[in-house]
Amino acid sequence: MNRISILDPALADKIAAGEVVERPSSVVKELVENSIDAKATQIQIRIIDGGRTLIEVKDNGIGMSKEDAILSIRRHATSKIKTDYDLFSIQTMGFRGEALSAISSVSKFTLMTCEENQVGTKLVCLNSEVVRIEPCALTRGTIIQVEELFYNTPARLKYLKADSSEFSAILDITNKLALAHPEISFSLYSNQKLMFQTSGKDDIIEILSEIFGLQVAKNMHYFEKQTHDFKIYGYTSSISFSKSNRYSIFTYVNGRYIKNKGLTDSVIEGYHELLFENRYPFTVLYIEADPTILDVNIHPTKQDIRISKEFDLRKLIKETIHETLTQTKKINEIRMSSTRQEQQPIQPFFDFSIQEKEETYPSSFTQMENSNETEFVIPQSLPHQEDHYYLPIGQIHGTYIVAQSQDGFIIIDQHAAAERIRYERYQKLFLENHHSIDLLFPLVIELSNSDYQELLPHLSLLKEVKIDAELFGNNAIKITHVPYYLDKIDLKTYVETLIQQIIQNKKIDLNALKDYAIATLACKASLKANAHLSFADMEKIIHDLFACQNPYTCPHGRPTLLKYTLQELQKAFKRT
Ligand SMILES: Nc1ncnc2c1ncn2[C@@H]1O[C@H](COP(=O)(O)OP(=O)(O)OP(=O)(O)O)[C@@H](O)[C@H]1O
Ligand SMILES: [Mg+2]
């Protein structure tokens, strides 16, 4: 009995659409890429209800004839490649001939298009079928309207997020496309409101300013270098402007936004030792290469590409960025100090020495968080506070405290211990209701436009972690009140870290956020390895550690101390 049959074309289109059209932002990406390939100089995007109700992309590109318009929504219909050779030397954004067919199979789709000095064509499409074709009055260009996306694929519809989240993803993709093509003027409207615009004057800095705000744009440095195989150029932020995640590194290859961890790592490596741990730059990196050394045909979204000689490219990026930063470091420092005077006194980065009076730990520290961890065995006989008095003997390797008791000695990891002490202290402070203090200079935090949109519906969460924030102009928030114990830390970094945590967690759990806030405070403000300690410092750490509810591990679960008894020593030296 024959059981196999060829799928109905409309069903085959829907299956193929699953890969290309994941959510509204994928539709925007595909339509805008088509407009770019059509040599548009102006692209306008209109979104209603996060793209659920309408996505419209209008361009002034070359348009299509009536016959091409009809063909354009068929699968494997493309004007961009014809031969094998073309496939291996792609010059355009699209080439697979599947985007319009995919989009039109999962939406109510209307296309209006017109070539120079011709009569325009309007085509209405439902369920992969053209249901109406008629002439229409239009100047050169194309308008595509995608209504009720996923109306006929309920499973996909169910997975759409809140309108604000979908719009934020659209804004994010538009940012990336606009940065890829500063020579094109983009405008993006959400529910009739203009949300993002670029002039098309080929000004990358202008676009960076739209996305990240003026302060970041002002602190960008240009870099450029060319080898036989590659030309790289772009802008990267000075070391005084960093982010808590790596999402602000935009990489383009021949005008295409790509995601490539190796290339992003090379940018970060270019900042080697110039940025604090877990801080990342803002970078826009353009790479130009002969299309024959690139393979773009790896994934339907084309954001993943293979580059031959990638190793050479990574080296080139890392060295160019590092050179740019070290050369401009001096200029930066002058700039930084003048900006600081204009604004507010900047607090040292979680400076231990300026905690409340009773805290007298020293302030010099280097990070040890990600150092290679060795396996620890926690000794069976753990010491107790009331058991013994521990007399500090000294500090070894600038990292461990050795203290002796009547029946043995302990070795304390000073960073882990300080982290535990702070963790419990902040835990207690968070539970208590302290008066907020007015910030003498309210702290203004500029966000990227998409982060801002993402944060908006959750702004009240900051209040839950005791930070009073209000909206402040375009894409910025103002922090006005914080509890007294946050007054003396690098508040900006702390709040930015919390914001990223809010944005990145799809389901926000308040308790988890509070825990995260406490752990961040404890870790960032903790004493690091290689800090010199006086005997008084050591005594205080020992005292405070044993006053903790759980003195034996740091909040990440690593041991804070090891104990050796005299008996164990005697056994080891074969004295018994
Ligand atoms: N805005 C536009 N202006 C002019 N022509 C367009 C426009 N959008 C689409 N087209 C034409 O329709 C064809 C099909 O578009 P579609 O996006 O489906 O495929 P593609 O761009 O060739 O490849 P891919 O699937 O990789 O995007 C294109 O090759 C192009 O000729
Ligand atoms: Mg396309």
Image: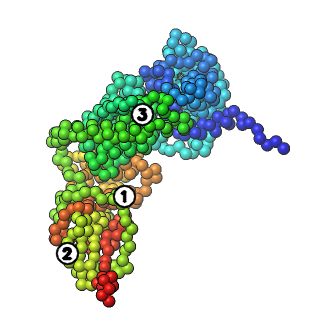
Residue at coordinates 26% horizontally, 68% vertically from top-left?
Answer: 400
Q: Is mark 3 on a helix, strand or loop?
A: strand
Does the image show residue 52? no
Does the image show residue 318? yes
Residue designated by label 2: 393
Residue designated by label 3: 252
Q: What element carries label 2?
A: strand
Q: Nearer the viewer, mark 3 or mark 1?
A: 3
Whole-angstrom CA distance, mark 3 to mark 2, is 57 Å
Whole-angstrom CA distance, mark 3 to mark 1, is 34 Å
Q: What element carries label 1?
A: helix
Whole-angstrom CA distance, mark 1 to mark 2, is 35 Å
Number of marks present in the image shown? 3
Which of the 4 image quadrants contains residue 339? Answer: top left
Residue at coordinates 22% horizontally, 64% vertically from top-left?
Answer: 398
The numbered disc on residue 516 is: 1
Residue at coordinates 19% horizontally, 37% vertically from top-left?
Answer: 331
Specify the farthest residue to the right. 1
